Amino acid sequence: MGDNIWPALIAAAIGGLGGALVGSIVPYLLNRKNERLQRTKGYAELDQSISVRLGKAISELQSKHLNKRMFALGELKKLGRAVPEEQEDIVRILGLFIREAIENLDRGKCPDAGVYLAAEVASLFFTESSYKVDLRGLKALDIVLSRMTLQGAQLEEADFQGTELNQVDFQYASLSNSKFQGAELKNTVFCGAKFMSSDFQDVDLSLAHGIDIKQLHRTTMNEATRLSEEQRGALDAFRAELDALRATHGVAP
C-alpha cells in the first residue's frame, strides 16, 4: 500500500468527528507521519501496516455500536503499547473522542463504557510516556463521571458544576481555573493535581483525597464548602503561617 493513501485514509477516518476537527488534526497527523517515514525507511511495510490499523481503529470510533468502539479502543491501546511513537497521536485522537462524547451528554446522564475506556487508555499513556490528553475548557455540567480515570489530563478551565465526580482519579491532572461548584467529590483523588484558582463553592471536600492545602488556599470557597477536621486544621495553620510571615516582613495581607 502506498503512502499516498494516508491523507484520504485519515480524512475519511476522522471525518465523522466533525469538519473543524479534521481541519486541525489531519495536517498534524500527516506531518507526524512524514517524520516517522524518514526515521523508518527500512521498515516501510511495517509502517504501512500500522497506518492501516490506526486508520481503521479511528474509523471504528465513529460506529454507533458500542462493541465496535470498544474494539477500536482496544486496538489503539495495543498499537500505542507496541509502537510508542504512535502514543502522542493516539492520545490526541482520544481527547477529541472523549470531549465530543462528554459535551454531547444530556444532563444527569453518564458516558458509556467506551468513553471510560478511552480515558483509561489516555491515562495509561500518560503514565508510560507523559502524554497529556487535552480536555482544556471541557463542558461537563450536571452529568455523571464517577469512577473515571483522568490521570494527567489537561483540564484547565473545565466546567464540572453540579457533576458527580465521585472516585474520579485526577492524579497529576491540570485543573487550574476549573469550576467545581456543587459537584460531588466523594473519594475523588487529587494527588499531584494542580487546581489553583478553581471554584469549590458549595462542595464537600471532606472525603476527597490528596488535597494540597497550599493550593486550596488559593481557591474560591464559601460557607457551604465542607472540609474535614484535618483539612481545616492544616488550612488554618497554613494561613496563620502566612500571616506571621507578612507581619514579620511588613507585607499587607
Image (cartoon, rainbow, N blue to C red):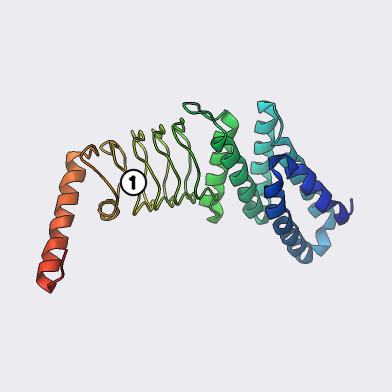
Q: Which residue is drawn at 31% across and 39% down?
A: 208
**Residue pushed farthest bottom?**
249
Q: Which residue is drawn at 83% across and 62% down?
A: 42
Q: In this view, does 179 lie to the left or right of 246?
A: right
Q: In this view, does 16 lie to the left or right of 151?
A: right
Q: Which residue is drawn at 65% across and 38% down?
A: 73
Residue 88 placed where, x, y %?
Answer: 62, 54
Quadrant in which the C terminus is drawn: bottom left
Q: In this view, does 241 lie to the left or right of 141?
A: left
Q: Can residue 53 be seen in this view?
A: no
Instruction: Work out whether 188 lies above or below 22.
Output: above
Which structural element holds mark 1? loop
**Residue pushed farthest right?**
1
Q: Is residue 129 visible?
A: yes
Q: How many marks?
A: 1
| Residue carrying label 1 | 199
Circle 1 residues within 10 Å: few <14, some 14–19, many ≥20: many
Q: Residue at x 51, y 28 (%)?
A: 110
Instruction: Work out whether 182 lies above or below 216.
Output: above
Q: In which quarter of the view is residue 206 placed?
A: top left
| Of the pair 185 and 143, the residue shown nearer to us | 143
Residue 155 placed where, x, y %?
Answer: 47, 49
Residue 183 placed where, x, y %?
Answer: 36, 35
Residue 175 placed where, x, y %?
Answer: 41, 50
Circle 1: residue type: Asp
